[in-house]
């Protein structure tokens, strides 16, 4: 149950607070969006939207959970390290990116859990032999 709560919490928060707003304001952001990896402003924005909308949706329903969480780990790692310069506090601090990063790392390690589409689609029991 805890993994379901974590997936919904981190997935829906990312989707509604970050992903959808970037998608809705794409034309306004495309020319000025930060380009920490040198792909170009528009390409960087597209990659972030793919992570923060697509990855968050997959995470929320628990489909390809580890892959979706890994994509979001990369997104938050780049945001924390390169955009926020590893600063947790102060103006432009990356505390939120750091907290999201922690949640997504946990989901990469733990997976989607028993209440996920991964469990239904891939017939995993969601429990280790020790738990059974």
Image (cartoon, rainbow, N blue to C red):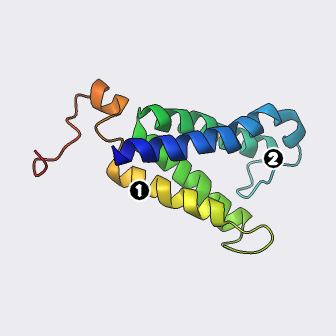
Q: Secondary structure at mark 2?
A: helix
Residue 29 left/right relative to 126: right
Q: Quadrant of residue 89?
A: bottom right
Q: Secondary structure at mark 1?
A: helix
Q: Mark 1 vs mark 2: which is more N-terminal?
A: 2
Q: Position of residue 53 (x, y in %)?
A: 62, 35
Pick the quarter of the image with the N terminus: top left
Residue displayed at 57% across by 39% down: 12
Q: Position of residue 25 (x, y in %)?
A: 83, 36
Residue 59 left/right relative to 117: right
Residue 119 left/right relative to 22: left
Residue displayed at 30% across by 25% down: 121
Residue on which the image places disc 2: 41
Mark 2: few/some/many CA within 10 Å (<14, 14-19, 20+): some
Residue displayed at 45% across by 43% down: 7
Residue on which the image places disc 1: 106
Q: Quadrant of residue 126?
A: top left
**Depth order, front residue of 12/47:** 12
73 is higher (above) or lower (below) than 68:
below
Mark 1: few/some/many CA within 10 Å (<14, 14-19, 20+): some
Residue displayed at 85% across by 42% down: 29
46 is higher (above) or lower (below) than 76:
above
């Amino acid at each position: 149950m805890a993994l379901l709560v974590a997936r919904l919490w981190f997935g829906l928060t990312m989707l509604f607070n970050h992903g959808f707003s970037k998608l809705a304001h794409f034309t306004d952001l495309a020319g000025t969006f930060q380009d920490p990896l040198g792909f170009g402003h528009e390409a960087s924005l597209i990659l972030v939207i793919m992570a923060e909308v697509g990855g968050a949706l997959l995470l929320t329903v628990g489909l390809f959970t580890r892959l979706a969480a890994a994509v979001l780990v990369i997104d938050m790692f780049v945001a924390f390290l390169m955009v926020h310069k590893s600063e947790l506090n102060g103006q432009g601090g990356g505390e939120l990116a750091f907290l999201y990063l922690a949640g997504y790392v946990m989901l990469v390690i733990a997976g989607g859990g028993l209440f996920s589409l991964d469990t239904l689609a891939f017939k995993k029991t969601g429990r280790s032999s020790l738990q059974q």
